[in-house]
Image: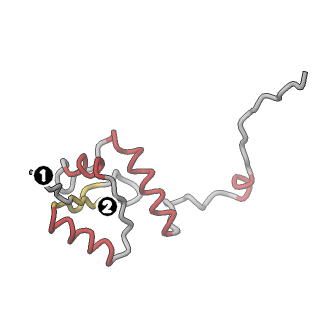
Amino acid sequence: MSKKTERQAVALKYDGENAPNVTAKGNDALAEEILQIARENDVPIYENADLVRLLARLELGDAIPESLYQTIAEIIAFAWYLKGKAPKGFYSKSAAEDATLLLPHQPQQNDE
């Protein structure tokens, strides 16, 4: 007899300054409702069962743990990129700063 895997969803909110926090979470029918609300409001949806299981352990209102900062930051950055958004001050660099390009040093090959 196979056990049916329940559907889970976790919603995070990020204000651009503080760590993202859990604003909604649920299983099965509630998970579907959370996803439907996200779709209706053009909220990007990222599917990763392992990450959802970790986040589902948090209580509503909890900030994500520091161990997930990098993972969540990459997901939020990509979602913002898709929506044409950026954090405060991201585009406020001077023209001189924008013109700076740093390239890593690569040793030259000798043709001997």
Residue at the front extreme, as displayed: 1
Most extreme residue toward the bottom is 40
Instruction: Determine the residue located farthest toward the right in the rendered image.
Output: 112
Q: Answer with left or right where residue 12 lies relative to residue 73.
A: left
Picture disc at residue 54: none
Which of the pair 92/76 is nearer the observer? 76
Q: Nearer the viewer, mark 2 or mark 1?
A: 1
At numbered mark 2, what does the secondary structure look like: helix, strand or loop?
Answer: strand
Q: Is residue 15 left or right of residue 37?
A: right
**For residue 84, side relative to residue 12 (left or right):** right
Rendered residue at 16%/52% (across/down): 59
Q: Residue at x 24, y 46 (%)?
A: 54
Q: Which residue is mark 1?
A: 2
Q: Which numbered dot is residue 13?
A: 2
Q: Earlier in the sequence, mark 2 or mark 1?
A: 1
Tell me residue 87's x, y (percent).
49, 59
The C terminus: image quadrant: top right
Q: Are marks 2 and 1 in contact (CB under 8 Å)?
A: no
Q: Position of residue 76 (x, y in %)?
A: 42, 57
x 31%, y 61%: residue: 13
Within 10 Å of the Cα at label 2, are there few (<14), some (14-19), or many (20+) other Cα atoms?
Answer: some
Looking at this view, is 89 or 73 the one in front? Answer: 73
Amino acid type, mark 1:
Ser
Check disc 2 and give the amino acid type.
Lys
Q: Cα distance, mark 2 to mark 1?
A: 35 Å
Q: Looking at the image, which residue is at 33% across and 41% down?
A: 66
* Image coordinates for residue 89, horizontal then vertical, percent: 54, 59
Foreground of the two, 66 or 91: 66
